[in-house]
Amino acid sequence: MTVHLWSEPPFRYLAPPTSEGSMKKITLKKGEERRIRRGHLWVYSNEIADNLAEFEPGESVSVVDSQGKPLGSGTVNPHSLIAVRLHSRMADEEADREFFERRIGTAWNLRQRLGLGDVCRVVHGEGDGLPGLVVDRFGDVFIIQHTSAGMDARKEQILEALDALFSPSCVVAADENPIRELEGLPLQRSMAGELEEEVVWVELDGLQIPVDLASGQKTGGYLDQVFSQRYVATFAEDASVLDAFSYTGGFGLHAAAMGAKRVVLADRSERALELATEAFKLNGFKAPETVKTELLDIKIKPFAGDKFDIVVCDPPPLVRNKKRIAEGLKKYEQLFAEALSWTNPEGFAALFSCSHQVGIEEFTETLRRTERRSDHKLLLLAHLEAGPDHPVAVAHPETEYLHGAFLQVL
């Protein structure tokens, strides 16, 4: 694994934070302040009256309406459709080390009040008032993502805040999310601290779970699915379970712990399947069956003639932008129909979308379309979503990105 220490950053720093009180102002066009006053945190480029070419990526700004009344403070990126991300309703609040320490500390206090342990999401972007920042905790190892120019420019301040609050042994910046390309940022992975192994093992729900620090997807572990894994596992006793898009087998592990008689893991990553198999062994479970396949290619029929009592279908985002939402929803419909064909009569299917552009209405309509194109009738037993360590800002619906349905297939 290539490791870059933050003391010698391989990336290009953007505009440094300004000193307090010296922020430039960004003025909105008349009438464009309404959504912001209602609590939304993004300002789009076409809502701004100023010439954005006068600003540097990551620069601190104070946002005002067309009458000059303050709306809040944020950071700007003139090269992005989301031109400003607000982090404060105060007129000139800089996102400095003290700000991050206070805001991250508040987020962690909430997780403690919720009874969450040391394996959880500590910061969920806009949901915790920190747009463009994700912080996941795996014991004393933290994995973070900077998905905006503003947060990327403040990596050192964020690292200092984490060190003051938690004294982590290692912080990995998994900055490989394609969203960064929309911000004009490189895709890369860097590290601060000591890393003894490329894979760390953490305890969650009494299970030993692998976290891939070297080449893991997203932040190395899908913490947004923990509550759904627990729920689906309650139906797994003496059941055959297919964990499709399994990654390191979170759904399968929880099912095995509840007495599943057969677990099949399917993923395109050989490394993920190897880690999952190791996890089953470490937890004392019967080895899972593994299938390396590209499940998004529905012409491939990896389970022809095989059916399962429970099917979990948790694909990667299939809608990357609003312009292609119809195409992406069609892919979900086709994939979900395939998942139903793998399910035994009167069995269960857990179907998910993690596309930020897909709301609950589009997801529900996709389920209806899936039912119509299949030979099955569906009973919705439960809506599934991320746990409380992924708080949703009510005025900012984009923070509610994970939608799931637990269905009986008839």
Image (cartoon, rainbow, N blue to C red):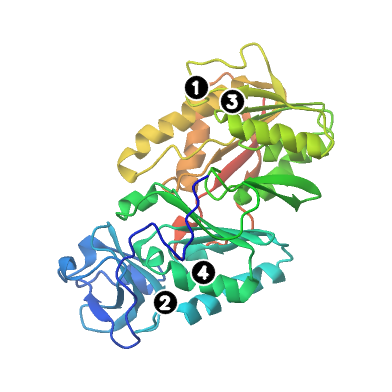
Neighbor class of circle 2 (other Cα within 10 Å; few <14, some 14-19, many 20+) is many
Q: Is residue 385 visible?
A: no
Sequence-first tag of 2 and 1: 2
Q: Nearer the viewer, mark 1 or mark 4?
A: 4
Neighbor class of circle 1 (other Cα within 10 Å; few <14, some 14-19, many 20+) is few
- Closer to the camera, 12 or 364? 12
- Closer to the camera, 200 or 33? 200
Q: Secondary structure at mark 4?
A: helix
Q: Is residue 308 visible?
A: yes
In the image, which disc is placed on residue 159?
4
Report the residue marked by disc 2: 95
Report the residue marked by disc 1: 373
Which residue occupies 18% across, 67% down?
A: 52
Question: Splitting the image into 4 quarters, where does residue 51 fall?
Answer: bottom left
Residue 131 image point, x, y percent: 43, 65
Residue 271 image point, x, y percent: 60, 33
Q: Nearer the viewer, mark 3 or mark 4?
A: 4
Which residue occupies 23% across, 72% down?
A: 28
Report the residue marked by disc 3: 339
